[in-house]
Image (cartoon, rainbow, N blue to C red):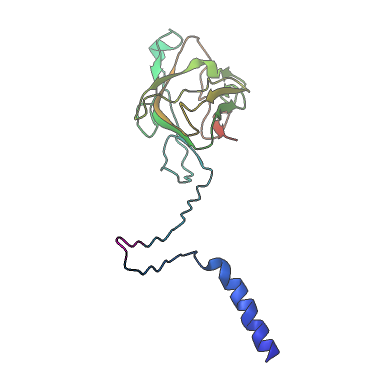
């Protein structure tokens, strides 16, 4: 009997935290009016979240797709200072969707490269030759682009207009400035010859 009672007491103690607090009032009388009141408490728990998209992506989802931006310079235009438009990107034409959403204040947004683009033969093209044009997408304030630099991390700080929420996006269009004559070859690639730029967002 004692063991049975103990088990029942333990089961009740475990179940109690799962019971919602409720209240009722019973009123009676001949007066006018008579009233009864009952109260209810609500609680909403919001997690801290941070979302970054550059190129192909789905809101609040992790997706492993990595887009590639390509530039093909016509032979007659090598190094003549005429910028070359890119191809590829989720919006095509060398343009990608960029988006940062966070709900806990200031966000540090960076771009990092391992070095200048190489062709595997010892020749390089600086990331300073790749320009980025920023245009608004859906947010009133376009998401700025951290400047690309060789073997370096560059940083921009995103600050909420009010409160703690940041929700910014933009269209980033890349172009090759083509201001110098360089040796032939394919510079960069698919995660080769310092081709990859890593964008990072961090939030307290």
Q: Is residue 19 above or below residue 111?
A: below
Image height check: is 121 above or below 16? above
Q: What stretch is highlighted in magenta?
A: 31-35
What residue appears at the point 35 percent right and 26 percent down from the top-left corner? 93
Residue 83's image quarter? top left
- For the view shown, which residue lies furthest in the front direction? 31
- Tell me where residue 148 sits by quadrant: top right
Which residue does the image show at 43% across and 34% down from the upper left? 55
Question: What count of labels does the image hold?
Answer: 0
Left or right side of 159 for 150:
right
Seen from the viewer's position, the closer of residues 34 and 46 is 34
State whether the magenta stretch is mostly helix, strand or loop: loop
The percent coordinates of residue 9 (x first, y second) are 64, 79
* Front-lying residue, 196 or 98: 98
The spot of residue 181 in percent (x, y) is: 50, 10
Q: Is residue 74 visible?
A: no
The one of 114 and 46 positioned closer to us in this rendering: 46
Looking at the image, residue 114 lies above or below residue 64: above
């Amino acid at each position: 009997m004692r063991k049975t009672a103990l088990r029942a007491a333990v089961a009740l103690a475990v179940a109690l935290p799962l019971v919602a607090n409720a209240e009722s009032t019973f009123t009676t009388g001949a007066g006018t009016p008579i009233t009864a009141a009952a109260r209810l408490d609500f609680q909403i728990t919001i997690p801290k979240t941070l979302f970054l998209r550059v190129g192909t992506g789905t809101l609040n989802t992790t997706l492993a797709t990595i887009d590639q931006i390509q530039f093909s310079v016509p032979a007659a235009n090598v190094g003549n200072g005429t910028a070359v438009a890119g191809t590829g990107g989720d919006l095509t034409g060398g343009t990608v969707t960029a988006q940062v959403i966070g709900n806990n204040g200031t966000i540090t947004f960076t771009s990092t490269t391992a070095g200048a683009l190489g062709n595997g033969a010892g020749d390089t093209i600086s990331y300073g030759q790749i320009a980025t044009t920023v245009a608004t997408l859906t947010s009133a304030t376009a998401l700025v682009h951290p400047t690309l630099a060789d073997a370096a991390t560059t940083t921009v700080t995103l600050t909420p207009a009010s409160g703690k929420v940041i929700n910014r996006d933009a269209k980033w269009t890349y172009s090759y400035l083509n201001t110098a004559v360089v040796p032939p070859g394919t510079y960069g690639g698919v995660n080769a010859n310092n081709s990859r730029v890593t964008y990072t967002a961090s939030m307290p």
